[in-house]
Image (tube, rainbow, N blue to C red):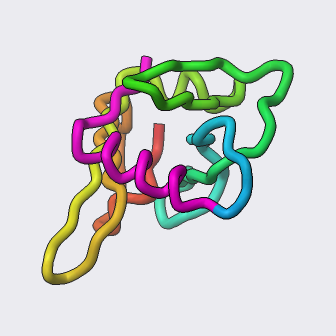
Amino acid sequence: MLNLTPTAIKAVSRFISSSADPVVGLRIHVQGGGCSGLQYGMKLEAEKAEDDVIVEMEGITLLVDPFSAPLLSGVTVDFVDSLTGSGFKFENPNATGGCACGQSFSA
């Protein structure tokens, strides 16, 4: 369904271990907005929702809501660290369009 590169797994693990609050997983979701109509979002969660799709990956629990699940099918999440900045990069083979920032897409 959803894939994280080794670099992304390492970054997420680092964020979870440095969190002051208890974390049950990383929520990855899609919501309306951005230049192309839909945008990706991520946040550490203290609780799972009853209807979450749960993906376990190398010790990390990913939480995906039912709306976002089909839009994230086949997506690869990477973590890029460069001189111009660092952050998560989404590669979505199902996107029909996107913007230069890489955080917004159309399906």
Query: Is residue 79 or residue 73 the one in the foreground?
Result: 79
The secondary structure that dominates the magenta segment is helix
Left or right, residue 88 beside residue 26: left
Query: Residue 60 at what x, y percent from top left?
Result: 48, 31
Q: Which quarter of the rendered picture does the N terminus lie within?
A: top left
Query: Is residue 32 or residue 59 the one in the foreground?
Result: 59
Query: Residue 75 at what x, y percent from top left?
Result: 36, 31
Who's the residue at 26% across and 78% down the image? 85
Who's the residue at 60% across and 43% down the image? 30
Question: Can you tell which quarter of the image residue 19 is in?
Answer: bottom right
In the image as oriented, which residue stretches furthest toward the left?
A: 83
Question: Can you tell which quarter of the image residue 47 is in?
Answer: top right
Query: Is residue 52 or residue 40 the one in the foreground?
Result: 52
Query: Residue 90 at what x, y percent from top left?
Result: 34, 46
Please determine whether, in this image, residue 23 is positioned above or below residue 76.
Answer: below
Query: Is residue 7 or residue 97 the one in the foreground?
Result: 7
Who's the residue at 57% across and 41% down the image? 28
Please determine whether, in this image, residue 29 is positioned above or below residue 50.
Answer: below
Please determine whether, in this image, residue 83 is positioned above or below residue 21.
Answer: below
| Total marks placed | 0
Query: Residue 84 at what x, y percent from top left?
Result: 19, 82
Who's the residue at 73% across and 23% down the image? 52
In the image as oriented, which residue stretches furthest toward the bottom?
A: 84
Left or right, residue 18 beside residue 24: left
Q: Is residue 18 magenta?
A: yes
* First to last magenta residue range: 1-19
Please determine whether, in this image, residue 84 is positioned above or below residue 11.
Answer: below
